[in-house]
Image (tube, rainbow, N blue to C red):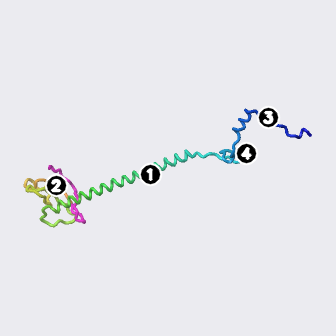
Amino acid sequence: MDDLKPKPITISDRELEVMKTKTVDLPGLLEYAHSVGGFAITPSKEGDIKSKAMEAMKEQTQDQLSMLFDQMKLLAKQAQEIKDRVDVSQMIYLAEMKFEPVLGKNYYLYKKDSGGNIISIIGPHEWGKNSSFDKCIAKVCLLHDHTWKILEKYDQED
């Protein structure tokens, strides 16, 4: 019957240290199965997932910002064209005009020798040597909103 009695186990200090490295206080927090019936918890490649997601996000936002920038450039160009139309329209409406302009027709804006501007139906190439105007400023067209579109600008020496 003495054979059935438990025998004391002698554990050396070294064995005790090795056993400490193979046991934990909270086995449920291990990232691997700690018992035969446990399931393995494999760590995700979180860094890879986040890195790929951030790259995709950066690329997408950069594409959107580029598209918005192109739209802003187009809007700025259109705003400048409107400003130019308003400027030349004001110049024409302050100029001498001896006829009623017709919508959609082309005219020429001249700088007069005596000062001021004048609008004419005669182009600079049609005058010959008898022009009493100093310089042709622009070829313009009257639009339906009564602004003037610059069709051709001529060099001005100020």
To which residue does mark 3 refer? 10
Question: At 23% across and 60% down in the image, what residue appears?
Answer: 86
Residue flagged by tag 2: what amino acid is it? Ile
| Residue 57 pos. (x, y %) | 48, 50
Q: Contact (CB < 8 A) between labels 2 and 3?
A: no
In the image, which disc is placed on residue 35?
A: 4
Q: Find residue 84 and report its horizontal and vertical position in percent.
A: 23, 57
Q: CA distance from mark 2 to mark 3?
A: 111 Å
Mark 1–mark 2 CB contact (< 8 Å): no
The earlier-in-sequence mark between 2 and 3 is: 3
Answer with mark 2 or mark 4, whichever residue precedes in sequence.
Answer: 4
Q: Which residue is mark 1?
A: 61
Residue 150, position as x, y percentages in the image:
22, 57
Question: Which mark is nearer the camera, 1 or 4?
Answer: 4
Q: Which residues are magenta?
A: 141-158
Is residue 150 a member of the stretch shown in magenta?
Answer: yes
Q: Residues within 10 Å of mark 3 (few under 14, many from 20)?
A: few
The disc, 3 or 1, on the residue closer to the chain's N-terminal end is: 3
Left or right: 129, with 45 as reference point: left
Mark pair 1, 4: CA separation: 47 Å
